[in-house]
Image (cartoon, helix red, strand yellow):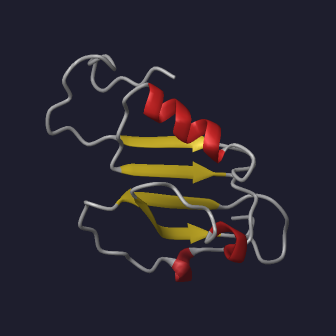
Amino acid sequence: MDITHNGIGKNEELGDSLILVHQNVIGLSSKISVFVSLLTLDNINPQFLCFSEHHMSESILCLINIENCNLVTSFCHQIYRKGGVCIHVRKDICYKNIDLTRYSEEKN
């Protein structure tokens, strides 16, 4: 994994930059440990982790534990299988959760 920010390589100083990592995981439960290990090996400490296509229900998604991160929002399909998105925020980041459920619609 090689993450760059405005031409800054992974081995260069990012300073006060915002680091957001997004991955279309196509099934998070079987890949989370590998993904987090890659971030650790590359010394990447993102403020935000966004996963799309996590393929989990709300009850299972809440059991996913990413060290030093909180699950702050997610969408899980109720009728259809697969899909879904979730956002984890590093614990030292202050945030305000905005309820977007009225805009969430399955298959749209």
Question: What percent of the width, then of the height, locates residue 20?
Answer: 38, 43
Q: Quadrant of residue 43?
A: top left
Q: Is residue 91 left or right of residue 12?
A: right
Q: Is residue 94 left or right of residue 88?
A: left
Question: What percent of the width, then of the height, locates residue 68?
Answer: 39, 56
The residue nearer to you, when weighing 74 against 102, is 74
Identify the residue shown where x is 54% and y is 76%.
103
Q: Is residue 96 left or right of residue 37?
A: left
Question: What percent of the width, then of the height, locates residue 62?
Answer: 61, 72
Question: Which image quarter holds the C terminus?
Answer: bottom right
Q: Quadrant of residue 3?
A: top left
Residue 23 in the image: above or below residue 15: below
Residue 71 in the image: above or below residue 53: below
Question: What percent of the width, then of the height, locates residue 13?
Answer: 19, 23
Identify the residue shown where x is 69% and y is 55%.
54
Q: Quadrant of residue 72?
A: bottom left
Identify the residue shown where x is 63% and y is 36%.
34
Residue 8 in the image: above or below residue 73: above
Residue 66 in the image: above or below residue 25: below
Identify the residue shown where x is 37% and y is 75%.
97
The residue nearer to you, when weighing 44 against 2, is 44
State how many labels appear.
0
**Residue at the limit of the structure toward the left, as seen here:** 15
